[in-house]
Image: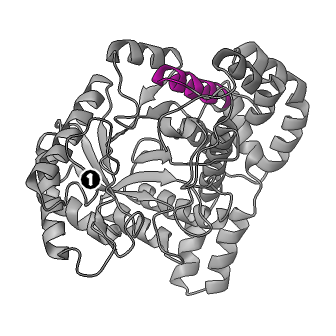
């Protein structure tokens, strides 16, 4: 995406933007501070979300999807050029093994990108793999299977070191489908022992992010099934181990914002995999189903990070985790980043001192009004202004479509591509 195309679009729409921005900014206190925080806030893009996501029944790929790690980096570079809010890519090994790390780093740097957490994969059997993960990986009853999974995670760390990544993200599908299939205590202890060996192999300046999920693909039990089990493992492992929150990995009605608040309070919140869900782990576009919940989560995040004196942009990890199947992947990711920044901007507008006063007075109605007034505020002009100041497009999707970018990618890459990943 040539910068002059973005600037030309912005020039045509600047008057309309100024009118909307002036109206939105009129009631914002500490406007410059809000805009600076919005400009600094970045959300990493997962390499596996750049192709059309799959379902249990099949995968319906679209045209112009990336065929290699290099092309995935190019697509993230395109996203970042448009929104100036996606300056990192997160790789999943072995889907995206960097054959030439130096060249890959240079390519990413050319697009203003760096590498976020690297993700291991022991929830699938790979071609040529000696032992199967059918009955688990790090919790497997067979020590040889556990050792294979441990060695894979350590290998992922080595790839990450070559790319200047600083975190290993671990999600396990380990669990059971039927009562009696698994000894819960034994499975947990074996998982802890396996993670301990991986933890000891981490560089001193690295983190281990431990994800959790209540079910799927195992439906009776999951060995790391909720935030408490992840937190317990992270606490036993040490300071470098933290709990990663995937918004889709919760049972219906779970108060995710309370979980986030407590993990942040304890210094054990690694960060997020952002998505949305109607039923379960749907991995839908962020904010497409329950944007109010997303806002409430960010309200706790802003309050908690401020209480600990943390930098909002770098204090924890921010990443999207989507597996859509009916939308243009780049448009979907642009929508997700926008939804995240909307929730963040709304949380920045909450008057914390007034809210605390209402809480201390047990003024429930006023406390609710304070939050809902911030949530009902149209912050899109503020986000667009921050994006404009950073050199991005006032309307990223509009520019993407106006420039017929997908059509250009199809000409380069073909109508149908076979991408690795979900």
Q: Is residue 40 above or below residue 221?
A: above
Is residue 30 visible in this depiction of the protein? no
Q: Secondary structure at mark 1?
A: loop
Q: Which residues are magenta?
A: 67-82
Is residue 377 visible in this depiction of the protein? yes
Residue drawn at 57 percent across, 66 percent down? 296
Q: Is residue 138 above or below residue 409?
A: below
- Prevailing SS of the magenta stretch: helix
Residue drawn at 80 percent across, 30 percent down? 401
Residue 34 x, y percent position in the rendering: 62, 45
Residue drawn at 58 percent across, 36 percent down? 51
> Observer-nearest residue: 137 or 389?
137
**Would you say 220 lies left or right of 185 here?**
right
Q: Is residue 255 above or below residue 207?
A: below
- Name the residue that disc number 1 marks: 133
- In magenta stretch: residue 379: no
Residue 375 x, y percent position in the rendering: 69, 63
**Would you say 217 lies left or right of 70 here?**
left
- The quarter holding residue 140 reads bottom left
> Observer-nearest residue: 81 or 224?
224
């Amino acid at each position: 995406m040539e910068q002059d195309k973005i600037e030309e679009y912005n020039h045509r729409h600047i008057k309309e933007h100024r009118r909307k921005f002036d109206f939105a900014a009129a009631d914002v206190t500490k406007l410059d501070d809000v805009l600076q925080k919005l400009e600094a806030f970045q959300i990493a893009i997962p390499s596996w979300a750049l192709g059309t996501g799959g379902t249990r029944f099949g995968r319906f790929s679209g045209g112009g999807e990336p065929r290699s790690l290099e092309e995935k980096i190019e697509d993230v570079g395109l996203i970042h050029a448009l929104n100036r809010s996606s300056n990192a890519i997160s790789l999943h090994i072995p889907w995206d093994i960097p054959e030439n790390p130096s060249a890959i780093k240079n390519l990413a740097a050319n697009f203003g990108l760096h590498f976020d957490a690297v993700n291991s994969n022991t929830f699938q059997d790979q071609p040529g793999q000696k032992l199967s993960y059918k009955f688990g990986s790090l919790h497997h009853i067979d020590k040889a299977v556990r050792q294979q999974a441990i060695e894979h995670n350590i290998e992922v760390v080595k790839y990450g070191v070559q790319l200047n990544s600083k975190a290993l993200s671990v999600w396990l599908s380990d669990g059971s489908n039927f009562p009696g299939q698994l000894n819960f205590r034994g499975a947990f202890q074996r998982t802890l022992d396996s993670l301990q060996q991986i933890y000891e192999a981490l560089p001193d300046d690295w983190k281990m992010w431990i994800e959790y999920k209540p079910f799927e693909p195992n439906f009776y039990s999951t060995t790391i099934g909720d935030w408490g089990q992840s937190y317990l493992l992270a606490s036993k492992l040490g300071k470098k181990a933290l709990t990663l929150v995937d918004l889709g990995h919760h049972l219906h009605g779970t108060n995710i914002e309370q979980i986030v608040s407590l993990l942040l309070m304890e210094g054990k919140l690694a960060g997020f995999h952002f998505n949305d869900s109607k039923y379960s782990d749907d991995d839908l576009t962020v904010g497409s189903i329950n944007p109010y919940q997303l806002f409430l989560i960010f309200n706790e995040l802003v309050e908690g990070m401020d209480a600990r004196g943390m930098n909002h942009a770098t204090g924890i990890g921010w990443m999207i985790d989507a597996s859509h199947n009916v939308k243009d992947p780049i448009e979907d990711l642009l929508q997700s980043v926008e939804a995240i920044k909307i929730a963040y901007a709304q949380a920045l507008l909450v008057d914390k001192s007034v809210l605390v006063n209402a809480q201390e007075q047990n003024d429930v109605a006023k406390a609710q009004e304070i939050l809902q007034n911030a949530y009902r505020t149209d912050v899109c002009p503020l986000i667009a202004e921050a994006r404009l100041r950073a050199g991005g497009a006032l309307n990223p999707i509009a520019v993407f479509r106006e420039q017929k970018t997908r059509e250009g990618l199809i000409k380069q890459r073909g109508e149908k591509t076979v991408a690795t990943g979900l």
